[in-house]
Image (cartoon, rainbow, N blue to C red):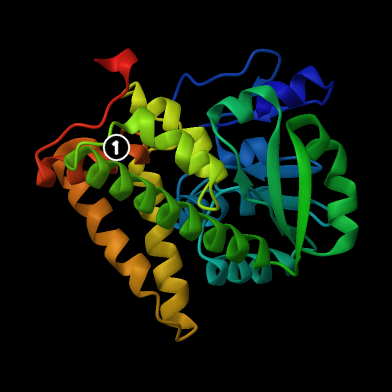
Amino acid sequence: MASNLVKAGHEVTVWNRTAGKDVEGARSATSPADAARGAEVIWLCVSDTKAVESILFGPQGVHESLTDGQIILDSSTIAPSATRRFAERVAAKGVQYVDAPVTGSKIAAEAGTLIFIVGGDEAPIERLKPLFAATGKKIFRMGETGKGEAAKLAMNLQIALIYEGFAEALTLATKLGVDAETLLPLIEASMVRSGVVEYKAPFVLKRDFSANFPLRLMLKDIRLALEAAKEARVKLPGLETVEEIYDMAAEDGHEDLDYAATLTLLEKWAGVEVKGASAA
């Protein structure tokens, strides 16, 4: 994302919790406070709520350099309630807060074709549109601050459930003697077809579970959705079951593989292996 901003001609300063992750054409900062100093927009994209809070309000955090008129743009997927809390804290310094988690794989990030799911006021979002244009292909407005995060959790909830259904279907079909490559055209021609299946099926058939979206991050999002549901007094029994499966897959050592690797847990229980001809 930072590389695409540089390519689009924006002046970019970067800071990463992991040393050495510099971006060609961008200045490397020594701390979040250094990165934020004098910036028009402070853009975060990190793994979880704790990381966002540390970067914003921890030692040498962004808060030390905040000035009136700046915008914080957070593309991390975190708790909606935390987003609203962070927005209230920085508003005291005249800083506007926009949550814009993304959907799209690592490939989409590199290609600049991400989709932004946005919560926040109209004025700062208008100012951010050139940055969205440099890094993504579409913006969906969800409402006030925090609602971008809420929509992202609702969407990832559905992705997790759809993929689990697909993985279970492949496992059962294989156990009953129906080849996965024979089943797939039927799925794609029927009402159960989905973008999740279309995207993941080629990787599954090749048994390529290298991470486009790591299992540990999907598990984190599942837990965030369950926490948000608990706060809202909403029961999500399907997602609770899927959380257990992801948790067991992580314990099996698959947390850094793609979330599609949850299939291997089902295979182990069934005593089968799902694969296409290219993986034979």
* Percent position of residue 205, x then y: 35, 26
* Percent position of residue 260, x then y: 35, 38
Residue 255 visible? The answer is: no
Furthest-bottom residue in this view: 233
Residue bearing mark 1: 261
Q: Residue at x 47, y 73 (%)?
A: 228
Q: Is residue 79 left or right of residue 217?
A: right
Q: Nearer the viewer, residue 241 or 133?
A: 241
Q: Is residue 124 left or right of residue 224?
A: right
Q: Residue at x 29, y 49 (%)?
A: 168
**How many marks overall?**
1
What is the quadrant of the C terminus in the image? top left
Residue 261 visible? The answer is: yes
- Secondary structure under the numbered disc 1 in the rendered image: helix
Res 267 quadrant in image: top left
Q: Residue at x 72, y 56 (%)?
A: 118
Q: Is residue 205 left or right of residue 280?
A: right
Q: Nearer the viewer, residue 6 or 222?
A: 222
Q: Residue at x 51, y 34 (%)?
A: 199
Q: Amino acid at mark 1?
A: Ala
- Within 10 Å of the Cα at label 1, are there few (<14), some (14-19), or many (20+) other Cα atoms? many
What is the quadrant of the N terminus in the image? top right
Above or below: residue 125 compared with residue 170: below
Res 161 quadrant in image: bottom left
* Percent position of residue 66, x then y: 71, 52
